Amino acid sequence: MKRVIFNWKMNGNKNLLNEMIHHYQKQGEKYGVSCSACLPSVYLTTGMDMNCSNVHIGAQDVFWLNSGAYTGSISAEMLKDVGVTLCLIGHSERRGRISGDVDPNILEANQDSSETVALKYHALLERSIEAIICVGETAEENRSGNTERVLEDQLASIIEVVVNNSVSKVTVAYEPVWAIGTGNTCSVEDAELRCAFINHLIKERVAKNQVQVEVLYGGSVSGSNVREYFAQKSIDGVLVGGASFKPEDVTVILEAASGCVVK
Ligand code: PEP
């Protein structure tokens, strides 16, 4: 079975939550799969209170300290307190690498660097909350042939945390910025290449390959292309944004996930 994580970003309301989480659950039961849904923080407990056993509720970001004068932030301790078991970190939209309507310059003060992502990772590890670490290059970085260098840079401080804490399993989502929410999907060949690169990079830097690496692909995944990504041997699952709210796409994605044997 391949892994499926739905990222709701800043979307939804109680009605949609009710409709979609039950849809995930129903399809999950039908195809014998589970999935995760990373919700806006105000809906985390609403999602968990729905008690849908095939749907793990996750957060979209976290701050690295436990408490203090950090208005608007949420700590790993708080996520643990309400029972959240996984959390995205380093999403390009949190790194200020956004291709939408917002001028990236006005996000600068609030954006993540690879160092803050590593601090967040460490905070989650300390609370035993699974981190889904997002990485990916911009269109410009891709065009200039710098994709692997960018991925290496984004992962360097993460690998340090893995080594220093003898982490046994890491999950990374490869999400090219130019493919997120644009409909411009990354070719399956390139996605496979990059996911394999991430897998080898982490294993090579951790002594004796003592780490299990799971790599997901994200970027305009839908019902019509998910099977091609799942067919790649280095792609262990998908991180899905826009299609998370389309019941037909969700059904195809979960059905496809159930038919896959993981390496
Ligand atoms: C995402 O938000 O991580 C994402 C991949 O979005 P989309 O599927 O809409 O490209």
Image: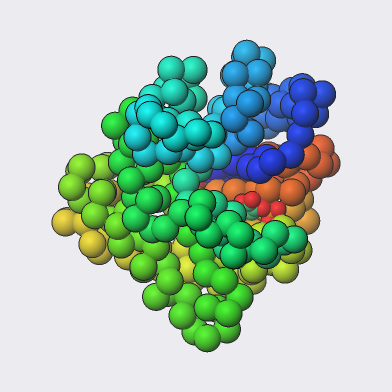
**In-front residue for pair 194/102:** 102
Left or right: 233 in relation to 224: left
Q: Quadrant of residue 257?
A: top right
- Rendered location of residue 194, percent (x, y): 48, 68
- Rendered location of residue 247, percent (x, y): 81, 37
> Is the residue 126 above or below the residue 173 in the image?
above
- Rendered location of residue 143, percent (x, y): 57, 84
> Is the residue 37 above or below the residue 239 in the image?
above
Residue located 38% across and 43% down the image = 120
**In-front residue for pair 107/69:** 69
Q: Quadrant of residue 49?
A: top right
Residue located 44% across and 23% down the image = 78
Which quadrant of the rendered structure holds the N terminus? Answer: top right
Residue located 53% across and 59% down the image = 108
Q: How many marks?
A: 0
Residue located 41% across and 31% down the image = 69
Q: Quadrant of residue 5?
A: top right
**In-front residue for pair 76/7:** 76
Left or right: 99 in relation to 5: right
Q: Residue furthest bottom?
A: 144
